[in-house]
Amino acid sequence: MADTTATPAHYSFFEGVERNFDKASKYTRFEKGILEQIKACNAVYRMKFPVRIGDNVEVVEAYRVQHSHHKLPCKGGIRFSMDVNQDEVMALAALMTYKCAIVNVPFGGAKGGIRINPKSYSTYELEKITRRYTSELVKKNFIGAGIDVPAPDYGTGAREMSWIADTFATLNPGDINAMGCVTGKPVTQGGVRGRQEATGLGVFYGVREMCNVAEDMAKLGLTPGIKGKKVIVQGLGNVGYNAAKFFSQGGAILVGIAEYEGGVYCETGIDLEALVAHRKATGSILGFAGMTDVAESGKVLEMPCDILIPAALENVINASNADRIQAKIVGEGANGPLTPEADEILNAKGVIVIPDMFLNAGGVTVSYFEWLKNLSHVRFGRMDKRFTENVNSQILNSVESLIGKSVNEVERKMILHGPDEVDLVYSGLEDTMIGSFHEIRESMLANPGVDMRTAAFIVAINKVGVAYEELGIFP
Ligand code: NAD
């Protein structure tokens, strides 16, 4: 199967991020030196370590980049992929700095990567590689609740985070905050409820908020609201699957899905869970009853829809396919799915691109909640759930006796309900995505003509710039 979304050989992801930064920095008031410092990667750790795989010793290449120390700890995911290289990890670490600033999470940006194809290793081998990588980070003081806190990313999940936490805790006996060294852990290992679906849910909240602005929708020739909007999602992994799920639940129509083995399209809507079950049974999303199969997966991105969510890899929309994109809104679920050239083409066509460093910030937002939970050693809601329910009950009883009427049992349950951990996490995430969307929109209104990515960069540069100014420069 030919890949129409291949990356041009000359393209540097980090340079692309710098290019966007430079474009936005013109709209800020900071001196050149401060801007250079915001842009620079503070620390790049490139390592190679041996791991015995079967009868052989394999030398594994890995990275951890801490882009900014203006706030500590640094924060960013770890990916397992054969595409991992220094340029990519640096770019992703830089995006993390801007992302944290945009959603008001008090961390500097970081990113890690191990250059392996996780599908080529057994679970035991992956555990060995992950634990060895963690011990390399410990040796160089590149991990810890107050230093640098990794999280899941492409090719990793809760299982790998659990191995990292356990290795760190073993090498740091007595560290009461050891569990705060990594986020995205299973709930039983210090994780927080709602983290797994957080990025996809944040993508949904962010796009929904944009669709709720009638004025902006009118410019795109769309009606306000998410209901009935046609959506295509690339990638059925953590971000893509959860985004697709919340779009469906929110009343949007899922018309296309692209995965690495191919894509499917159906104008009247795809039943996501049935498609996932079909893939589980057959090993492929292709051949699902009622769908049009698209052998060349990248072509699905070019099919008719209102909203396109690339949520798999970077650079998938580039100079070679951008002008064929039919969506009016492109929401970057993945990091860096558009090249700067694609950005320009889509902007010229009047497509609104909701940038990655805002739209997929749900993961780091809920990671921040998890880290707070780890440092406070108490589950969210534990102290106030019962209290809230008791107060609600007293208020309801008073109202009922005053008006002489009673609510039904379903209503009573809903009114009395005190928040569980997941309720608080979802609510904190929703509030963050809505608040940050409007900060970016206000920046667009204050700087007429800028696109949403530039506006998001302006917001981020202003926050990080002020932090550096107020921090002062160490003599
Ligand atoms: P994942 O490994 O869970 O899922 C990625 C999915 O993409 C997989 O299902 C894979 O099969 C699919 N895929 C691979 N090649 C493809 C192709 N050519 N066409 C279509 N699909 C293909 O990874 P993830 O955690 O969902 O991350 C996806 C993107 O989102 C990455 O860019 C990551 O940096 C970004 N992101 C993830 C999180 C998070 O919390 N997981 C947070 C922010 C950003």
Image: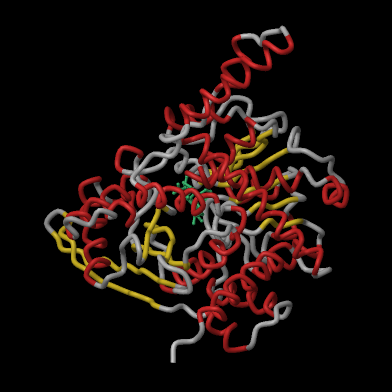
- Decide: is 72 above or below 81: below
Report the residue that reaches farthest toward the left: 55
Q: Residue at x 55, y 39 (%)?
A: 426
Q: What percent of the width, then of the height, locates residue 261?
A: 49, 44
- Decide: is 207 above or below 31: above
Q: Is residue 437 left or right of residue 473?
A: right
- Decide: is 199 above or below 5: above
Q: Residue at x 55, y 54 (%)?
A: 361
Q: Quadrant of residue 16?
A: bottom right
Q: Say how the picture is coloured.
A: secondary structure
Of 296 and 234, which appears nearest the observer? Answer: 234
Q: How many marks?
A: 0
Q: Is residue 293 left or right of residue 372?
A: right
Q: Is residue 110 left or right of residue 205?
A: left
Q: Quadrant of residue 10?
A: bottom right
Of 211 and 221, which appears nearest the observer? Answer: 211
Q: What percent of the width, then of the height, locates residue 62?
A: 32, 67
Q: Quadrant of residue 2?
A: bottom right
Asked if residue 316 can be seen in this view, the reply is no
Q: What percent of the width, then of the height, locates residue 188?
A: 31, 37
Asked if residue 105 can be seen in this view, the reply is yes
Q: Residue at x 58, y 24 (%)?
A: 392
Of 312 and 322, which appears nearest the observer? Answer: 312
Q: In what quadrant of the picture does the C terminus appear?
A: bottom left
Q: What percent of the width, then of the height, locates residue 132?
A: 21, 61
Q: Is residue 28 left or right of residue 372?
A: right
Report the residue that reaches farthest toward the bottom: 475
Q: Residue at x 86, y 49 (%)?
A: 215
